[in-house]
Image: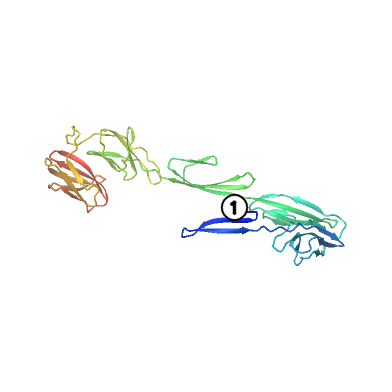
Amino acid sequence: TGGAYQYNEGVYYDTLQSVNSCDSIIETHLTVNALPPTPTIEIADKIIYSDATSGNQWYNIKGTIKDAVHQVYTPTGNDTLFTIVSNAKGCKSDTSNIIYFNTNTCEPAVNYIYPNICKGESYKLTDKNVNEIGLHIDSLISGGGCDSVIFCYLNVFPVQNIITDTAICEGDSILFNELYYSSDITVTDTLTNINGCDSTVTLNLKVYDKPQKPVLSQCEDMLYSSISIGNQWYNTNGPLIGEDEQIFFPDTQGFYYVIVTNHFGCYSQNSDTLYYLTTSKIDNSSNKPLPVTIYPNPSNNLFYLKLDQTEKIIEISVLNNQGQLLLNNKEQKNIIDLSMYPSGIYICKLLTNNGLKVLKLVKD
């Protein structure tokens, strides 16, 4: 309460938020009840006495002695005895001193042991096996008939079982237990931790294929990758930001290549470098754009061509991203209908009286 464990009497407050986001205040009045005094027991005339007049519960090494709840207890044979006192508030005292009662004149021996085991193991305590952490009490009877009491404080160390799922790409490898692995495999190794307990480490290795090495080709004023998705285009200066389609329209002559990444994050080999040389028949030495506009682009089905008064359409061809001819129109129509074809990227080759222009169409 009060945001921490409390051990002293007092009033403590906690603030909680309800499902309706309203604060609720919890007021706790803590009372700390006193423990009963630790009892002292003595033996006289083969009877065991407690200095606590009430609240006694007698125990031996086997546990609670049934109905032994009075100030006086009479043993029925050789035994190891102690009492714990409870008061009216339910609080219990510490354990009393221990009396070793026997009918012989010898004094019993007391042994304290502190063994360690690993989880899943057991410790042999005289004639029984124990495996739970904590105190275990047992006794032996010597040849002279005297009890030898053993207080066993058992500690159980945990055992770890670690499973690691790891994925790499084809051609890569991973080091595990001083060995390199580069194929699908499950490997388990047993290690000894600082407590001397065996722990297992399991590696589940999955190897993903790399994409095929892409092949580049040039069609008119575009470059084309043989792989449909995952492309990244490069020139001699590095990656070209935003150029990740199968088809690429360079704006300058030069060397280009592409690298493909699949959905596992694995990279292909670099494609062979291709030198792009413009093939357009348009005189673009003035760097003026061709007076042709396609709209809307992207579009669901229909694309419209807008040309200035000097442009006359001679032929319109549409190819898919594999270079296959889909449409060829030599009529002077300013509309391209792709309603019969799936979404994707298409190439429009527009031949006018002023030359050839290759344009990209994107159908949603």
User: As rendered, which of 178 and 314 lies closer to the eye?
Assistant: 314
Q: Residue at x 17, y 49 (%)?
A: 335
Quarter-of-image position of residue 82:
bottom right
Which residue is located at x 66 percent, y 53 percent? Answer: 121
Q: Quadrant of residue 255?
A: top left
Outermost residue on the bottom side: it is 67
Quarter of the image with the N terminus in it: bottom right
Q: Neighbour class for label 1 at 10 Å: few (<14), some, many (≥20)?
A: few
Instruction: Give the left or right position of residue 296, taking residue 148 as reference.
Output: left
Residue 310 rendering spot, x and y as whole percentages: 11, 40
In the displayed structure, 28 sits above or below 287; it is below
> Is residue 41 something one can see in this rendering?
yes
How far from the left and from the top, in percent, is residue 359? 22, 42
Q: Is residue 102 visible?
A: no
The residue positioned farthest toward the front in the image shown: 11
- In the shown orientation, is residue 65 left or right of residue 17? right
In front of the other: 312 or 262? 312
Task: State left or right for residue 225 relative to residue 29.
Answer: left
Q: Please name the colour scheme applied to the rendered image.
A: rainbow
User: Where's residue 207, x and y in %?
Assistant: 44, 45
Q: Which residue is mark 1?
A: 4
Q: Is residue 245 above or below residue 131?
A: above
- Say which of 201 and 76 sits in front: 76
Q: How many labels, in total?
A: 1
Displayed quadrant of residue 65 = bottom right
Helix, strand or loop at label 1? It is loop
Image coords of residue 74 (percent x, y):
82, 65
Label 1 amino acid?
Ala
